[in-house]
Amino acid sequence: MTDFSPTQPVIDDRAVVWSIPRDELAARIPGSRLLVIMHGYGSHEADLISLAPHLPGDIVCASLRAPLIAPAPIQNGFAWFQIGAPGNPEPSGVDAAARGVLAWLDGLTSAYGSPAAVSTLGFSQGGAMALQLLRHDPHRFASTVNLSGFSISGEAPADDELETLRPRVFWGRDERDPIIPPSAVARTATWLETHATADARLYPGAGHGITGDEVSDVRGFLEQTLLAASPAADAPAAG
């Protein structure tokens, strides 16, 4: 028995919530600064898109729906991967979800053309996803925002390369977060120290949530990374 109804790790493009009208995608995606947003466990694509008005106005935001249906008692909620041991999920499920997001990005490029630069922002499970995407295809992303999330245990395809690249990562959390266990926090801190250039910040009182000060800091981080990024070369197909 699993924690989820059976679904494939495929991103439903019809469910993506954009910060711009869909009929503007063809004109806006080519050359855009794109932020891919990933919600937390049990939430949905309409949640974190509320951050878009508080982020740099020159970026296009796409909020994705996770591919797995969260079990009861959650209603109308989704997840990126099975929880497993708290803070230490089975890596294969996270890798599958990461490949699904990369495939969606490939499809977006095929349909509309290449964005100038892409960053990711994820909360909790979505934050783990943001880091795992970086660990699969580091050259695709200008920067990564991990809010109240964690790194996945084990090795990922680009870990060795990341030790040299050291991409920009924002990690925001409350040290009294009641959801993410200390072991996952320690693992994330160790991984970031050796694989990224991390801007790690604490937000007392946030709990397992996002504060206004944190959003302001994320805005500044994206101005320095996503908006300032050089146009990327066409990304290779996800493998």
Image (cartoon, rainbow, N blue to C red):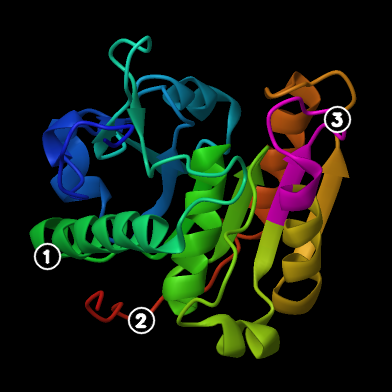
Q: Is residue 85 left or right of residue 30?
A: right
Answer whether labels 1 and 3 touch (C-beta < 8 Å): no
Q: Which residue is mark 1?
A: 110
Answer whether labels 2 and 3 touch (C-beta < 8 Å): no
Which quadrant does the C terminus fall into? bottom left
- First to last magenta residue range: 170-184
Mark with earlier residue (2, 3): 3
Rendered residue at 19%/63% (across/down): 109
Residue 197 at x, y percent in the picture = 76, 70
Q: What label sits on residue 233 in the rendered view? A: 2
- Looking at the picture, which amino acid does disc 3 mark? Tyr
Q: What label sits on residue 203 in the rendered view? A: 3
- State the separation of the CA atoms marked 2 and 3: 36 Å
Query: How dense is the environment of label 3, judged by Cα within 10 Å: few (below 14), some, or many (20 and up)?
Result: some
Q: Is residue 41 left or right of residue 64?
A: right
- State the separation of the CA atoms marked 1 and 3: 39 Å
Residue 143 at x, y percent in the picture = 58, 61
